Each structure stands twice: as C-alpha cells, then as structure tokens.
Image: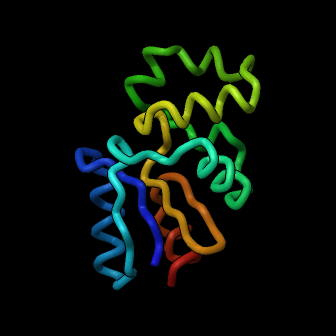
Amino acid sequence: MVKVYCYSRCSTCQKALKWLKDNGVEHEAIDIKEDHPDEKALRKYHKVSGLPLKRFFNTSGLQYRELELSKKLPGMSEDEQFALLASDGMLVKRPLLVGKDFVLTGFKEAEWADALL
C-alpha cells in the first residue's frame, strides 16, 4: 500500500486520488496540512526519490510566495531547507506519493502509472 500526502482542497490532489481509485491502487491518504512528514521522513523521502531538494517545495503555494523562498532557498543550507519543509506541510509539494522503493512529488499520470501499474 502506498501513502499519499495530499490536501483536500487541492484540485491536483483530488485528481490524483481519483486516479488511484480508478486504477485500483490501495492507498492511505494523509492530510499534509494536519499530519505532514517530519524532518526525518523528508530526508528519507528525498534520498529515495533521487530528486533535487527544491522539487519537494510547493512553489505555487501561498507560504512559498509570502516567505519569498524563490530568493532565499539558493542561500539556505540543506539542513535549513529540511527544517523549513518539516515546519509546515503546506510548503511541501503535493501530492507526495510514497511507495516501498520510490517517492514522487506532484501528480504526473505517466510517472505514477510507471511506478504503480
């Protein structure tokens, strides 16, 4: 079973959850705002994903813009970035799909199909 960190008011998350259901993929939906991953989990997900850390940030989110992170992230250490991501689930790119041996950020149907079907 995969975990999906998502936000109920996010249309992309809704679309991703529908895709999982339509494709018969067993999953656990976790509210990223109320039960977001902690720093230890984020570090693990980052390592498994093989993605650049910046791909874990929700760059279209309100907090991202308010904190002007597009300007600040390049000067922040990796430790500072992980601490920031762990401080607020709304800063984390969603949906965040966590499987046994893969982690995907955002919903790209082809990527999800490759990983799950």
Residue 33: percent from the left, percent from the top? 35, 41
Residue 13 falls in image quadrant = bottom left
Colour setting: rainbow
Q: Residue at x 30, y 60 (%)?
A: 15
Q: Residue at x 74, y 17 (%)?
A: 75
Residue 72 falls in image quadrant = top right
* In this picture, residue 99 sits left or right of residue 35: right
* In this picture, residue 56 sits left or right of residue 4: right
Which residue in the rendered view is the most extreme toward the left?
9
Q: Residue at x 68, y 26 (%)?
A: 80
Q: From what the image shows, is residue 68 above or below residue 80?
A: above
Q: From what the image shows, is residue 32 above or below residue 17?
A: above
* In this picture, residue 15 sits left or right of residue 100: left
Residue 117: percent from the left, percent from the top? 50, 84
Q: Residue at x 67, y 55 (%)?
A: 44
Residue 108: percent from the left, percent from the top? 49, 60
Q: How many marks?
A: 0
Which is more toward the observer, 27 or 109?
27
Question: Image quadrant for the N terminus?
Answer: bottom left
Residue 48: percent from the left, percent from the top? 70, 61
Q: From what the image shows, is residue 7 above or below residue 23?
A: above
